[in-house]
Image (cartoon, helix red, strand yellow):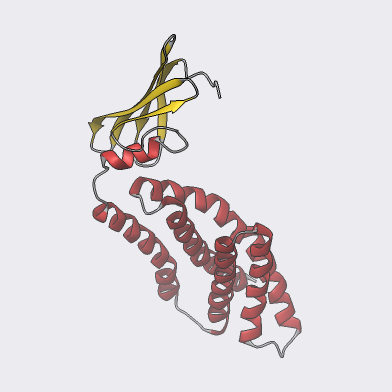
Amino acid sequence: MKSVVDRKALATWITVSFVVVTLAFYFSGRAHNSFFAWTFVSLIHGGLTVALFGNAVSMLIEYLHSKWSTMNGLLYITLHSFFGLLSGILLGNVVFLTIAIVSATLFGSVDYWLKIKKRSTYALTSIGVFPVAVIVGIWLFTKITQGPFTEAQAIDVATNGQSVPDYSGEQTETIGAYEVKRTTEREKIDTNTYVVIFIESWSNEYYSGEWYISYKVNRHDAEVLDSGGRRVPDTR
C-alpha cells in the first residue's frame, strides 16, 4: 500500500506543478509580481482539485486495474483522461477543459510509468524536485525579461471601465446641454508605481462643476486614493 501512496503522491505533485504554472501564466499575463501571486492562488484551487478529486478517481481506476487483469496501460491512462474531460466540462470553459484533460492524462501517465518501472530513491527525488526547479526558473525568467512599468501601462490599468482618456492628455465632448472635458494625468512614484488622476470638468451657459478620482497603480492593481466633486448631470 505504501508504494501506491508514494506513487500517487509523486504523480499528484508533478501534475499540480503543471496546473499551477499553466493557470498562473493564463491569469497573470506573465507579469512577474502577478505570476507569483497567481502561483499561490492556483496552488490552493488547482492543487486541491488534483489532490482530492484526482486522487479519488485514480484510486478507483487503480482498484479496477487490480480486478481487471487485461487492462493495459493505454486504457489505464485513457480512463484518467476521461474523468479529466468530465471535470473540465463542469467548469464550462475551453481553457479549463483543456487543462483538465491534459492534467488528468499527465497524472495517469506518470502514475502508470511509476507503477511499471522500479526507480531508486535518488531518481524519484530528482523527479519530485524537477517541478520546483521549473517554477523557480520561470519566475526568475519573467523577472529578468520583464521590461519597466510604463506610464501607458499604468494608465491602462487605471482606466479599465472608466470613461476617460486612456492616455495622458485630455478630450472634449458634448453630453446633453454640457460641454465636458476629461483629463488624464499621471505622476511616477517609483519604478513600479504611478499615481493616475482622472478629472472631469463640465459646464454650460448656467452651470459648471468638476469631478475627480485618483489611483495608486502598480503592475496588476489599482487602489483608489481620493475622489470628489460632482459628475456631469445627465440631461439626455
Q: Position of residue 182 (x, y in %)?
A: 37, 27
State left or right for residue 107 relative to residue 27. right
Judging depth in this view, the residue of 13 and 157 nearest the camera is 157
Q: Residue at x 53, y 81 (%)?
A: 113
Q: Residue at x 59, y 54 (%)?
A: 48
Dividing the picture into quarters, in which one does residue 180 lie?
top left
Up-down relation of residue 15 to residue 211 (above or below): below
Q: Position of residue 184 (x, y in %)?
A: 32, 29
**Farthest right residue in view:** 67
State left or right for residue 147 relative to residue 89. left
Q: Position of residue 221 (x, y in %)?
A: 41, 37
State left or right for residue 198 relative to residue 14. left
Q: Residue at x 45, y 54 (%)?
A: 24
Dividing the picture into quarters, in which one does residue 8 lie?
bottom right
Q: Position of residue 28 (x, y in %)?
A: 42, 51
**Farthest bottom residue in view:** 70
Judging depth in this view, the residue of 198 and 63 nearest the camera is 198
- Report how many numbered discs are placed on residues in the image: 0
Where the C terminus falls, by quadrant? top right
State left or right for residue 23 relative to residue 148. right
Where the N terminus falls, by quadrant? bottom right
Judging depth in this view, the residue of 52 and 9 nearest the camera is 52
Up-down relation of residue 32 to residue 202 (above or below): below
Up-down relation of residue 131 to residue 48 (above or below): below
